[in-house]
Amino acid sequence: MIFHRIVHGFVIQAGAFYPDGRYKASPYPPIKLEINEKLRHDDGAVGMARSNDPNSATSQFYICVGPHHELDGRYAVFGKVIEGMDVVRAINNFDSEHTTTFHGMQNWPMQDIMNNVTIISVYGLALTGIIGIGYNE
């Protein structure tokens, strides 16, 4: 899996594309938007990406770089980075010279940024951390 979207000072996003740009469709139907008011878009929050339809989230997720409370109540937060935030920031610091428009999508990184996600399930919370995010230099 690759990080396919980098928006400086906002988010890095992954979960739907192969490194060659082919779309990887989710084998599952979209999920209904669920908001937990205790989970906010703080620095390192992990949330479900979606289209304009609030109930359209499938496999894409984003990691917030800095607090983005304008997203609270509109996008579902389901976890938080507990280790590796320095790598998230390094990925997010790619400037516009390192991103392009690819297959009609803006902010696509020009070099592959791979991730290795470790998911830890806890009753009542789907994800407690993302560990081992890395990128190719």
Image (cartoon, helix red, strand yellow):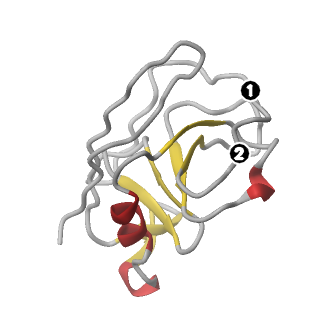
- Kindly identify the residue that appears in the image at 72 percent across and 23 percent down: 32
The 10 Å Cα crowd at callout 2, few under 14, some 14 to 19, many 20 or more, is many
| Amino acid type, mark 2 | Arg
The quadrant of the image that shows the C terminus is bottom left
Disc 2 element: loop
Lower sequence index among marks 1 and 2: 1
| Disc sitting over residue 15 in the figure | none
Q: Relative to residue 97, is residue 136 depicted above or below?
A: above
Front residue of 37/23: it is: 37
Q: Residue 2 appears at what percent x and percent y?
A: 32, 51
Image side of residue 113 versus residue 100, left or right = left
The quadrant of the image that shows the N terminus is top left
Whether tag 1 and tag 2 are in contact, CB under 8 A, the answer is no
Quarter occupied by residue 130: top left
Q: Residue 42 appears at what percent x and percent y?
A: 64, 54
- Kindly identify the residue that appears in the image at 69 percent across and 38 percent down: 39
| Disc sitting over residue 40 in the figure | 2
Front residue of 112/42: it is: 42
Q: CA distance from mark 1 to mark 2?
A: 13 Å
Q: Which residue is mark 1?
A: 34
Which of the two marks, 1 or 2, is nearer to us in this view?
A: 2
- Kindly identify the residue that appears in the image at 44 percent across and 83 percent down: 95
Q: Residue furthest top?
A: 123
Front residue of 91/83: it is: 83
Image side of residue 97 versus residue 62, left or right = left
The 10 Å Cα crowd at callout 1, few under 14, some 14 to 19, many 20 or more, is some
| Amino acid type, mark 1 | Glu
Q: Residue 67 appears at what percent x and percent y?
A: 66, 61
Q: Residue furthest bottom?
A: 97
Q: Residue 94 appears at what percent x and percent y?
A: 39, 78
Q: Residue furthest left?
A: 137
- Kindly identify the residue that appears in the image at 18 percent across and 65 percent down: 136
